[in-house]
Image: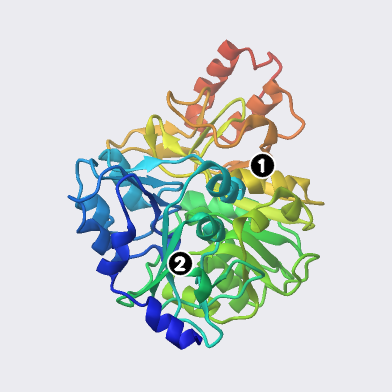
Amino acid sequence: MGFSETYTAKLVTADEAVKIVKSGDTVHMGLFCGVVYDLDQALAKRVDELNDVTILTTLNPNAEAPAVVTADPTTKHFRYHTTQFSAMERQLNKEGKAWYVPVQFREIPKYWQQEVDIDVAMLQVTPMDKHGYFNLGPQVADEPAVLKKAKTVIVEVNAKMPLTNGTYGHTLHISDVDWIVQGSNRELPTLSAKGATDADKKIAGHIVSRIRNGSTLQLGIGGIPNFVGSMIADSDIKDLSVHSEMFVDAFLKLYQAGKITGNKKLDPGKMVWTFAMGSKELYEFVDGNSIHLCCPVEYVNDIQTIATLDNMVSINSCLELDLFGQVNSESDGFQHIGGNGGQLDFVLGAYASKGGQSFLCTPSVRTGKNGVKTSQIKAVLSAGSIITVPRQVVHNVVTEYGIANLKGKSTWQRAEALISIAHPDFQEELIQGAEKMGIWKNSSKIQ
């Protein structure tokens, strides 16, 4: 039987495909731009027939909640689990309709293989090529491990899914697919970075002044990393490479500005990443473009892989940190905000690189809805705060007031360095806190 005949034999409606799901199953519904839509709608119709079904995803970037969640507001039939948090998933969590799965991103393929039983895997893919292969689109990440573990694999074909190149894991052969659903060809969800504040611009300026020609960049999610990329595009820095968990619009700007040459030891001439999220123009840029390598996360985020790249620069945002240097990038007290992603992977890998640097960025203060300002650098972390990056591995912390390098410093030296980049209105309060904690010397001073 040829590929076309096999395709026809496996082609079913979404309603028919989801009949395979039974009570007690664990169903992975795809990740990033590959989260299924038609299959989600079809599964939601079966809400009263099913119980105790666990829904998994790595991150769902869509603005609207999944149909399986809205169809089951009491979560008696479907339990929604995610290893990262989009804005939509954050809201569901506040409503008690979504739960977070803590992961170390580079390890997540092993979790699926070793720790979790996956009964059904669903994902959006490109149309099949003449050789019988579907392409996973601009997200590989942990999906190959999901597909390998799943007892049943269902693909939802989206003609608007960009085709990406990779080393392995970015394609799926029809022989490994159980059912094929022709999707409704929805546009991919886009992600727009917020406009940069004055503090963001100053933070970016501090970082850009430290970046050398020939560096390899990793940019995390958020306004600050994106603005750093934009500022580099307008600078004299040149001969850059890309090795980043997430591929964002700032990299496109850098490429258009002629800053990216890819002259690095590993994967020369290629931009390496594990998923892309951004504008429609970004998706058009990666579609069929041979300079891109969309690779599994266990390769992209591997600490030794990152360490191989000389002058590796990792730039990520955080939410708060304390005077010990412990960094929280996940929660506002007990309220979960977002997943840790690969932040720790790149903090460790960048510092292990020859000439490498990692930067964790935050404005010095946050202004609440009531207009009250609070310091993002605290004597001690707020109750319920999650430690995303432990103090012993933090390299550079950046606010609009400067950069604090914490490597090789004692507890009082760390406190002194961090207070020096805190907002002046809170420095005296922080000094008092440090004194109570026994990490302030009488001779300490703010530079």
In-front residue for pair 426/249: 249
In the rendered image, which residue does mark 2 sit on?
Answer: 278
- Would you say 133 lies left or right of 372 here? right
Q: Is residue 187 left or right of residue 231?
A: left
Residue 277 or residue 332, whichever sits in front: 277
Residue density around tag 2, few if under 14, some if 14–19, many if 20 or more, within 10 Å: some
Q: Is residue 419 left or right of residue 48?
A: right
Dot 1 crowding, Cα within 10 Å, few <14, some 14–19, many 20+: some
- Give the image quarter of residue 40: bottom left
Return the x and y of residue 169 as percentages of the image width and height. Answer: 60, 66
- Tell me, yes or no, if residue 342 can be seen here: no
Q: Amino acid at mark 2?
A: Gly
- Residue at image position (36%, 48%) is 25
Vertical placement of residue 54 versus 35, above or below:
above
In the picture of the structure, the residue carrying the numbered disc 1 is 396
Foreground residue among 339 and 213: 339
Among the two numbered marks 2 and 1 on one chain, the one whose residue lies closer to the N terminus: 2
The answer to whether marks 2 and 1 mark residues whose Cβ atoms lie closer than 8 Å is no
Look at the numbered disc 1 and give the secondary structure of its residue. strand
Q: Nearer the viewer, mark 2 or mark 1?
A: 2
Mark 2 secondary-structure assignment: loop
What residue is rendered at 56% in x and 61% in y?
144
State the CA–CA distance, disc 2 to disc 1.
Answer: 27 Å
Question: Which x, y percent locates residue 350?
Answer: 71, 49
Residue at coordinates 64% horizontally, 80% vertically from top-left?
290
Residue 288 appears in the rendering:
yes
| Quadrant in the rendering for residue 333 | top left
In the image, residue 442 lies at what x, y percent? 68, 13
